[in-house]
Amino acid sequence: VTIVIRDVNDNLPEFISSNSTTVAENIPPNTVVMAVKAADRDEGRNSYIEYSLSPDPMFSLGPVDGLLRVTGRLDREVRANYTLWVTARDRGDPPRSTRVAVEVKVTDENDNSPVFDPRQYSASIPENASIGASVLQLDEPGSELLHVKDIPGELNGVYCRGEELWVSDGCNQSTSSQQVSATDMDEGANGRVRYGIFSGDENRDFLISEDTGVIRVAKNLNYERRSRYLLTVRAEDCAEDMAEVRTHST
């Protein structure tokens, strides 16, 4: 006597793939992010699995192969994390299904240049100011002392040029201690900003803190020798790959 035990669809699909992954921003559409995989211990149709994804404009999921693909442009600065709900459903009658959340983390690419904020600065310093004195002060809103413009040849470099830095002939003028400030929306070293005086100070009468952007007197100033300076300050990020460094100056 041969007894054949027929399968009953009494097992749920079980996900055996990871429930998290990472993906770089700006990758081309249709790029595969990961393969979702589930298994069912039943037999025949009861073990065949189809996949579905809760609607999301940035991703799609292959119903048979379980391949999760990018369908839109990922921008980490807009959104850094996605929670996608994936369902695995067998073909039993009635079907059984399992739902799981898949976490997708968008990693940073150095796709943003530093941006100066505010974009307008001016400075005035007495000629007898001591070496090391701070010279930069924030200009009043609406001033046209500085203008933002692109400089050809720099990778996404946007430069603010200062019209003039005045040296006054007197010792009673007070100065305000402020620094130039730029921010970068990228992450880590890609978003860490460093500063340098790009042009306008051939005699190196001033120096700037690479980390803070504070501009200080580096040498004794002489009003009769030079009373005005046109400085261009550059901000660049600290990307490890120098080919990826992006700049912005004021």
Image: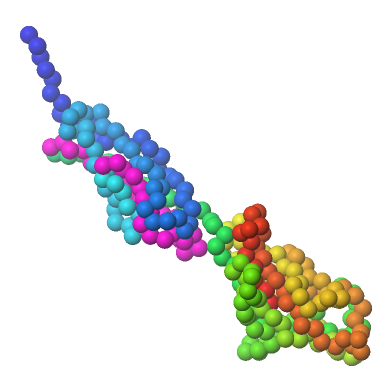
Residue 229 lies in what quarter of the image?
bottom right
Q: Quadrant of residue 139?
A: bottom right
Question: Magenta stretch: residue 39 in it?
Answer: no
Q: Which of 41 and 147 is in front in this view?
A: 147
Using residue 47 as the reference point, say whether residue 205 is left or right of it.
Answer: right
Residue shown at the point (85%, 74%) measured from the top left: 204
- The answer to whether any part of residue 95 appears in the image is yes
Q: Where is residue 102 in the image (x, y as percent from the top left)?
A: 38, 47
Q: In which quarter of the image is the N terminus?
A: top left
Front-most of residues 197 and 124 = 197
Q: Quadrant of the C terminus?
A: bottom right
Query: What residue occupies the far left of the structure in this picture?
Result: 1
Give how far across and how far down residue 162 sits, in percent. Answer: 72, 82
Q: Where is 196 relative to 65, above or below?
A: below
Question: What range is drawn magenta here?
Answer: 64-93
88 is within the stretch colored magenta: yes
